[in-house]
Image (spheres, rainbow, N blue to C red):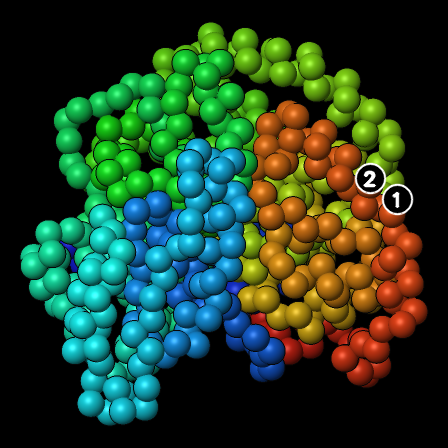
């Protein structure tokens, strides 16, 4: 288990903390074996097309907190992508119990050239007080950018001074893009700040309360937990500052994506005595069985969990079998973030489909709790067998295009916007489901399977698009080994 140090203002990045990598090609089984043996080594690409930024991921952890405000301390362009969270909040908020979803409180200090010379401390200090005056939030989060990090603004000191003056948490999140080439280090930065400044230690426990570290999917847990005699405490989208502060009262923490929640779950266990459920999220029959049984064991609800499993299987296993018969022999390719990408591979295998490979944005050899039992890729390999053509890449679209041109699957599954475009340009039916809860549980297998069937059967548009698309990559590149620019994967190669 990595040691969580909440006394430090900044979180250690995943490359150093977990040994995470962004460069690998081979098979899923080989990757897991190298990770377990400690021989996995990250290798750089001699050509890189793009890279994700940790700032947006840090914002993801705090922008949707209902009664908080967020200040991006940097050039206004660094806040340009944050408007998408305002859309997410308004669209999904009502599905998650927000009575009146409004625009998000997102601000920028708009650093300019002069600020990089003379410093942006005063600008940030003024912005904090202006934001407090305008929207009266119950907490203010400050996300740093490359500009403010490079010039060394005292963001932490300014936040502490403002907190003492205003009487609300003013939380500095250190997430400059240059800190890490692994974009998910931004999640860790956001949750590190939350664990340090918002969550309160307590001896009080609510034995039926379960923390759920998640994104912004539809609330499926309320119905599940009601049947088990439990309640959900969502972290952090759509939560309130007070709700987050009482997270230490929960009986356990679960996470729907270990890429997202690894750090916060480990911090809650180490610092606040809230145990983490250390199995993969409930995607696919085997993992769903394990997940509910572990949840029942941890909360003293073993009988209720077994009854739930029995009822759900009686209802949904016949439907799953029908869909398997329709999808048998169909091929697919997956591109997604790490843990959720592994979950999509589990769903494909459960549906009787054949994954032809995956382009996964990074790989964590182990999560912050140090438990091998919730290694989501290892569990997929153990439950369903190996995955060939497994590529770890930090969103290198030139590699994805090359691979799709060669394998030509029946469908491309994606988790992030913009990726399905490349499948469509090659005439490949492509499916993006942004709701990460959509495929969870036994019913989720049926729902996801039906969407896959629907997408494969309605392929006329992408077939026509392929005929009229001018592809940006040269014939030379499409004929190359897709990993031409990637080094070896272990010491000595």
Q: Is residue 91 in sight in this rendering?
A: yes
Figure label count = 2
Pointer 1 local density, CA inside 10 Å: few below 14, some 14–19, many at least 20: few
Residue 56 x, y percent position in the rendering: 43, 63
Residue 349 x, y percent position in the rendering: 72, 38
Pointer 2 local density, CA inside 10 Å: few below 14, some 14–19, many at least 20: some
Residue at horizontal 32%, vertical 86%?
112
CB atoms of marks 2 and 1 within 8 Å: yes
334 up-or-down from 128: above or below: above
Q: SS of the residue at dot 2? A: helix
Q: Which mark is residue 457?
A: 1
204 up-or-down from 12: above or below: above
Mark 2, residue position: 453
Position of residue 334 in the picture relative to residue 79 (left or right): right
Distance of label 2 from label 1 (alpha carbons): 6 Å
Residue 306 x, y percent position in the rendering: 53, 11
Residue at horizontal 57%, vertical 42%?
436
45 up-or-down from 349: above or below: below
Q: SS of the residue at dot 1? A: helix
215 up-or-down from 316: above or below: below
Front-lying residue, 244 or 452: 244
Q: Is residue 40 in sight in this rendering?
A: no
Give the quarter of the figure containing the N terminus: top left
Residue at horizontal 27%, vertical 91%?
114
């Amino acid at each position: 288990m990595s040691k969580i140090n909440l006394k430090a203002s900044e979180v250690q990045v995943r490359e150093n903390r977990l040994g995470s990598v962004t460069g690998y090609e081979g098979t899923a089984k080989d990757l897991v074996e190298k990770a377990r043996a400690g021989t996995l080594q990250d290798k750089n690409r001699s050509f890189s097309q793009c890279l994700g930024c940790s700032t947006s991921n840090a914002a993801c952890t705090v922008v949707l907190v209902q009664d908080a405000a967020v200040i991006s301390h940097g050039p206004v362009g660094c806040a340009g992508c944050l408007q998408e969270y305002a859309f997410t909040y308004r669209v999904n908020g009502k599905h998650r119990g927000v009575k009146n979803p409004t625009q998000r409180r997102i601000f920028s200090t708009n650093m300019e050239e002069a600020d990089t010379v003379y410093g942006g401390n005063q600008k940030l200090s003024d912005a904090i007080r202006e934001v407090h005056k305008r929207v009266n939030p119950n907490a203010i989060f400050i996300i740093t950018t490359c500009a403010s990090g490079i010039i060394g603004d005292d963001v932490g000191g300014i936040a502490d001074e403002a907190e003492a003056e205003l009487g609300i948490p003013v939380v500095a999140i250190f997430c400059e893009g240059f800190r890490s080439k692994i974009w998910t280090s931004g999640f860790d930065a956001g949750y590190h700040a939350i664990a340090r400044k918002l969550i309160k230690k307590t001896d009080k426990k609510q034995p039926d309360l379960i923390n759920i570290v998640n994104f912004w999917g539809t609330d499926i847990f309320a119905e599940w937990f009601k049947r088990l005699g439990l309640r959900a405490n969502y972290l952090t989208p759509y939560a309130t500052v007070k709700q987050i502060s009482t997270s230490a009262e929960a009986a356990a923490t679960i996470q729907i994506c270990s890429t997202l929640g690894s750090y916060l779950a480990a911090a809650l266990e180490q610092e606040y005595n809230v145990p983490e459920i250390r199995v993969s999220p409930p995607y696919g029959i085997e993992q769903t069985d394990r997940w509910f049984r572990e949840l029942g064991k941890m909360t003293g609800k073993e009988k209720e969990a077994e009854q739930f499993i029995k009822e759900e299987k009686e209802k949904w296993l016949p439907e799953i079998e029908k869909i398997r018969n329709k999808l048998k022999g169909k091929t697919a390719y997956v591109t997604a973030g790490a843990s959720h990408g592994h979950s999509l591979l589990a769903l494909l295998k459960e549906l009787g489909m054949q994954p032809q490979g995956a382009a996964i944005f990074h790989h964590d050899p182990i999560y912050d709790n140090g438990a091998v039992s919730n290694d989501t890729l290892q569990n997929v390999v153990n439950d369903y067998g190996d995955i060939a053509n497994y590529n770890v890449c930090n969103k290198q679209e030139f590699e994805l295009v090359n691979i799709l041109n060669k394998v030509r699957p029946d469908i491309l599954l994606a988790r992030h916007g913009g990726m399905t475009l490349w499948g469509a340009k090659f005439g490949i039916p492509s499916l993006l489901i942004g709701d990460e809860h959509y495929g969870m549980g036994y019913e989720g297998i049926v729902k996801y399977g039906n969407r896959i069937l629907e997408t494969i059967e309605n392929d006329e548009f992408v077939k026509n698009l392929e005929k009229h698309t001018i592809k940006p990559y040269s014939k030379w590149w499409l004929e190359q080994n897709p990993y031409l620019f990637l080094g070896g994967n272990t010491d000595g190669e």
